[in-house]
């Protein structure tokens, strides 16, 4: 497969031009060694948000590889794509459709910031039987159907995260069927699942019925940090494709990284070559590692092919302690909290890497954990809109003093970047328990003058 962006960068470097343009390093050595390929929108280099040349060609290559109606690049991760696809769903909603998005509660905080910027109202989907983690929010098709039936009109979209941070894959096909029968779109935050298209049987959301989705290419494919895709299904009206670049430009820098775009371009070549086989091999090796862990007595969670999630609490450990054990064994986990440890593999994970991980886990002694109840659901009452809360004056208070105050902005680290309390909600005792459980020490709340006396809205 051709690589038009990389070819341009290679050719420009060979020409030895005097660079009277950005960036300031002028392509010279001395920093990282990548400077010769770091350029701006010079003649022939195209422009990401008005692409008609080499970038458009490269994006068309990606669309063919993913089987999408259209695929567009982001150099600012899935966060930019999340905002863009929500904008597209809202801008293209049927006349009379309210600016409402039904969303599983384990959203990335980029979704909350999108709600502030686009001023839409979320209707939350909560776990029907509780959950053991803030990161998980299983959505049953029957529950989604009941939620949509109870609304006065179809929402602009339904939004879910799959895979979630713990490696749980949703039943996309069943959820898509419910959405389409109820006259709405299914949007999927597939940030962790770009590789799903290239398994023996594709598990990618687009192939299972999603209408729009975002993939963080850099999380599981050979792409530099920040490289991501916005995918549109083949069934969407032309207006979505026509407005996609404007949607991305609305939330993106006017100086997108050509280094990141070049890595997306070169990834097309890899995906057209040996990368799918490397992904399938890694999935097989991880499956073997999962079996080995189970045989040793570790309790595992999730069903994602390239993610190993150890339920440390159910194995008699804490997640942070187990992550420390792995670190001693030369393994750095993707994520650890009080209860879980997550290891992420990719096509670049070597057989030696899998062996080292197996050895590190074998140094632990799993034992039955203490039964723990489901975590409380922090269903705070809506006091004002997310937009009103985010753009009002805030103050920071200790988490233990936050109950009764109105959340001003999501206070959560990344990973996992999943809010406990959402902007505009009054913080209740359940949220306070979750703050303590996840080690959140400070919370942004509205100043008392803004938080008091506001009208309560149902969430």
Image (cartoon, helix red, strand yellow):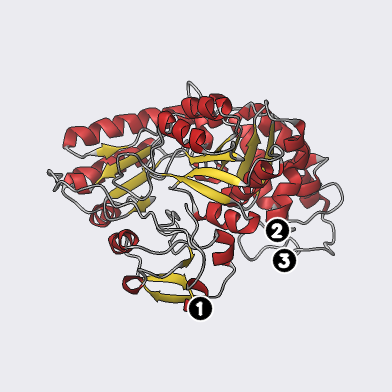
**Viewer-closest of 340 and 370:** 370
| Residue 171: percent from left, percent from top | 44, 29
Location of residue 327 by image quarter:
bottom left
Q: Quadrant of the N terminus?
A: top right
Counting other residues with Cα less than 10 Å from the Cα at mark 3, is it few (<14), some (14-19), or many (20 or more)? some
Q: Is residue 313 left or right of residue 109?
A: left
Residue 187 visible here = yes
> Which residue lies at the image location 74% right of the left edge and 67% below the top edge?
24
Residue on which the image places disc 3: 25
Dot 2 or dot 1: first in sequence order is 2
Contact, CB < 8 Å: mark 2 with mark 1?
Answer: no
Counting other residues with Cα less than 10 Å from the Cα at mark 2, is it few (<14), some (14-19), or many (20 or more)? some
> Which residue lies at the image location 59% right of the left edge and 50% below the top edge?
77
Residue on which the image places disc 2: 253
Dot 2 or dot 3: first in sequence order is 3
**Which one is closest to the eye, mark 2 or mark 3?**
2
Image: 208 above or below 316: above
**Which one is closest to the eye, mark 1 or mark 3?**
1
Residue 198 visible here = no
Q: What is the number of callouts on the image?
A: 3
**Viewer-closest of 326 and 81:** 81
Image: 166 above or below 278: below
Which secondary structure, mark 2?
Answer: loop
Which secondary structure, mark 3?
Answer: loop
Which secondary structure, mark 1?
Answer: helix
Location of residue 235 by image quarter:
top right
Residue on which the image places disc 1: 449
Dot 1 or dot 3: first in sequence order is 3
The residue most toward the top is 201
């Amino acid at each position: 497969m051709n690589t038009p962006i990389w070819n341009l960068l290679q050719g420009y470097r060979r020409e030895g031009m005097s660079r009277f343009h950005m960036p300031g390093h002028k392509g010279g050595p001395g920093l990282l060694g990548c400077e010769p390929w770091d350029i701006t929108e010079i003649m022939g280099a195209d422009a990401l948000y008005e692409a008609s040349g080499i970038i458009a060609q490269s994006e068309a290559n990606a669309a063919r590889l993913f089987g999408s109606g259209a695929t567009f690049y982001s150099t600012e991760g899935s966060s930019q794509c999340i905002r863009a696809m929500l904008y597209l769903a809202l801008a293209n909603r049927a006349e009379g459709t309210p600016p409402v998005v039904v969303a599983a509660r384990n959203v990335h905080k980029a979704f909350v910031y999108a709600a502030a910027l686009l001023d839409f109202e979320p209707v939350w989907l909560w776990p029907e039987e509780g959950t053991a983690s803030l990161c998980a929010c299983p959505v049953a098709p029957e529950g989604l159907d009941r939620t949509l039936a109870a609304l006065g009109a179809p929402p602009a979209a339904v939004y879910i995260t799959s895979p979630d941070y713990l490696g749980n894959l949703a039943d996309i096909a069943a959820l898509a069927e419910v959405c389409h029968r109820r006259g709405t779109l299914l949007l999927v935050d597939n940030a962790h699942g770009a590789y799903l298209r290239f398994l023996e049987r594709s598990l990618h959301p687009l192939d299972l019925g999603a209408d729009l989705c975002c993939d963080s290419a850099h999380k599981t494919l050979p792409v530099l940090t920040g490289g991501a895709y916005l995918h549109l299904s083949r069934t969407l009206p032309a207006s979505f494709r026509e407005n996609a670049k404007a949607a991305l430009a609305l939330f993106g820098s006017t100086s997108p990284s050509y280094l990141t775009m070049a890595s997306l371009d070169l990834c097309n070549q890899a995906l057209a070559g040996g990368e799918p086989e490397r992904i399938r091999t890694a999935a097989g090796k991880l499956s073997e590692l999962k079996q080995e862990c189970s045989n040793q007595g570790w309790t595992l969670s999730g069903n994602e092919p390239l993610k190993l999630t150890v339920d440390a609490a159910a194995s008699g450990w804490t997640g942070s302690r187990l992550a420390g054990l792995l670190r001693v064994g030369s393994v750095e986990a993707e994520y650890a909290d009080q209860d879980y440890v997550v290891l992420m593999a990719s096509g670049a994970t070597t057989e030696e890497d899998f062996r080292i991980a197996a050895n590190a886990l074998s140094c632990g002694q799993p034992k039955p954990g203490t039964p723990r109840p489901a975590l409380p659901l922090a269903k705070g009452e809506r006091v004002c809109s997310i937009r009103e809360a985010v753009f009002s004056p805030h103050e920071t208070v200790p988490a233990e003093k936050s109950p009764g105050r109105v959340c001003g902005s999501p206070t959560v680290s990344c990973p996992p970047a999943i809010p406990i309390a959402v902007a505009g909600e009054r913080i209740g005792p359940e949220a306070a328990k979750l703050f303590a459980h996840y080690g959140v020490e400070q919370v942004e709340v509205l100043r008392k003058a803004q938080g008091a006396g506001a009208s309560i809205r149902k969430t």
